[in-house]
Image (tube, grey):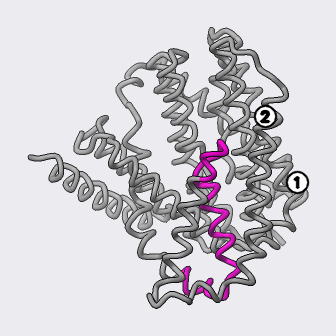
């Protein structure tokens, strides 16, 4: 089989597995994303071996999560985000501090020196907005106040996680950490989010007529998709995740009078592309690393620390929303997803992590991504106590 045919076969297997997994999960009253991640575990190298992670599939997965966060941004207005700004900031900051402290203490207690312990702790920090956003979108809950807090906190979370990763990486190589450099990096990241968020939305409100200027009847969609890809790239240039730029692009596009049309037109793209992200997340788990009781206990401890630390940080930061609202926010901040996997990959490549530690971090990231959706769905569906 030639390379092109092999890629097409992989695409077919991934897409069909995603549909089957989502269908099974939804029939079990679980969010479809749980079934898609589980399908990835089954068809990946650890079980059936039908699909191997590859650059082509990873690219499609990246495009899928970028489009997902763009669509979430389309359903989010700047004025709504401003109203929850204080809570989002508190959740974002505490959601970084608590996991980082508990993660570093666990790593040091497990035998890592402090420099490596801080690197391990960085994998506990960043929330994966893509997984929570998908659940909120499936449940039609993006307009809830708790959802806006989660999405705003995820942006702050990403900025702080990026700074932490820069610091702990420098510690591994013995590079001097300069406060002036960190302040420059922080100001660039914050400046990018603020300028794009504030200026971009104002410009779009006045210029939405330009989206209909080209002859192509799909021009509003094609123009905002170009904006999405452009801001996703720009975000990476400022050290942020591409999904932050995509989310901002969607938020800008939500200010146009074509907003409802754009939401309708992006649905087929989401149906095609987003399953690749969740299935490929599942394929990266290595079950063979957990073939003994000691490894399983370590995984249980790491996952418990990851869940509890984010839950505490998010809950404390969102207490202004009431006990139940704070709990929803705390649970929504739990998934690590692709962020933890990326940091684990950097640690393995840099010789900081052993294969077992790498497998622990990756499995923890995936387990937090699998556990969160059903709990979040239950909390959002449960009638409020009167």
Instruction: Judge by depth and name the residue closer to the eye, 253 or 352.
Output: 253
Asked whether 88 falls inside the magenta stretch, the response is no
Quadrant of the snapshot with the C terminus: bottom right
Give the mark nearest the N terminus, 1 or 2: 2
Magenta segment range? 234-263
Query: Taken as a whole, is the magenta stretch helix, strand or loop?
Result: helix
**Which one is in front, 80 or 103?**
80
Q: Position of residue 34 (x, y in %)?
A: 47, 55
Q: Nearer the viewer, mark 1 or mark 2?
A: 2
Q: Which mark is residue 98?
A: 2
Considering the numbered disc 1 on the image, is that residue within a helix, a strand or a loop? helix
Q: Which residue is mark 1?
A: 319
Q: CA distance from mark 1 to mark 2?
A: 16 Å
Q: Residue at x 63, y 14 (%)?
A: 173
- Residue lying furthest left in this view? 1
Q: How many marks are shown on the rendered structure?
A: 2
Q: Bin the neighbour count of mark 1 within 10 Å (Cα to Cα): few under 14, some 14-19, many 20 and up.
A: some
Mark 2 neighbour density, 10 Å: few (under 14) some (14–19) many (20 or more): many
| 45 relative position to 61: left or right | left
- Residue at 74% of width from left, 84% of height from top? 206
Please report the residue visible at 41 percent of the width from the left and 44 percent of the height from the top.
Answer: 282
Q: Is residue 52 left or right of 298 when viewed as pictured? A: left
Question: Toward which corner of the image does residue 15 lie, by quadrant?
Answer: bottom left
Q: Is residue 237 magenta?
A: yes
In-image side of 266 versus 109 (left or right): left
Question: Looking at the image, is 365 positioned above or below residue 2?
Answer: above
Q: Nearer the viewer, residue 36 or 29?
A: 36
Q: Which mark is residue 295?
A: none
Coordinates of residue 167 in the picture (x, y in percent): 72, 25
x, y percent for residue 194: 79, 58
Q: Position of residue 188 (x, y in %)?
A: 76, 45
Q: Secondary structure at mark 2?
A: helix
């Amino acid at each position: 089989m030639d390379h092109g045919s092999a890629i097409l076969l992989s695409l077919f297997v991934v897409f069909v597995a995603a549909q089957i997994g989502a269908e099974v999960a939804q029939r079990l009253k679980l969010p479809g994303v749980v079934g898609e991640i589980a399908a990835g575990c089954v068809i990946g190298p650890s079980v059936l071996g039908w699909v191997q992670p590859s650059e082509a599939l990873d690219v499609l997965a990246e495009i899928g999560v970028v489009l997902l966060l763009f669509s979430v941004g389309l359903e989010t207005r700047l004025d709504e985000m401003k109203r929850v700004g204080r809570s989002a900031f508190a959740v974002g900051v505490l959601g970084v501090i608590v996991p980082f402290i508990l993660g570093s203490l666990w790593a040091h207690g497990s035998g890592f020196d402090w420099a490596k312990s801080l690197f391990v702790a960085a994998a506990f920090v960043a929330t994966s907005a893509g997984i929570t956003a998908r659940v909120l979108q499936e449940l039609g809950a993006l307009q809830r106040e708790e959802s806006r807090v989660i999405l705003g906190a995820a942006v702050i979370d990403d900025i702080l996680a990026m700074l932490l990763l820069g610091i702990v990486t420098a510690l591994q190589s013995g590079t001097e950490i300069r406060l002036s450099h960190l302040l420059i990096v922080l100001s660039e990241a914050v400046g990018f989010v603020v300028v794009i968020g504030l200026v971009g939305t104002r410009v779009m409100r006045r210029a939405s007529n330009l989206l209909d200027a080209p002859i192509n009847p799909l021009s509003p969609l094609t123009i905002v998709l170009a904006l999405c890809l452009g801001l996703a790239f720009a975000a990476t240039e400022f050290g942020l995740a591409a999904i932050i730029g995509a989310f901002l692009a969607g938020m800008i596009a939500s200010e146009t009078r074509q907003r409802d049309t754009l939401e309708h037109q992006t649905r087929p793209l989401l149906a095609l592309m987003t399953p690749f992200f969740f299935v490929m997340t599942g394929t990266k788990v290595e079950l063979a690393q957990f073939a003994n009781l000691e490894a399983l206990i370590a995984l249980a401890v790491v996952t418990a620390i990851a869940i509890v630390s984010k839950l505490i940080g998010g809950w404390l930061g969102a207490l202004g929303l009431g006990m139940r609202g704070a709990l929803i926010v705390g649970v929504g901040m739990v998934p690590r997803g692709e962020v933890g996997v990326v940091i684990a990959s950097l640690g393995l490549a840099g010789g900081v992590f052993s294969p077992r530690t790498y497998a622990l971090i990756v499995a923890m990231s995936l387990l937090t991504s699998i556990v969160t959706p059903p709990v979040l769905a239950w909390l959002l569906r449960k009638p409020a106590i009167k």
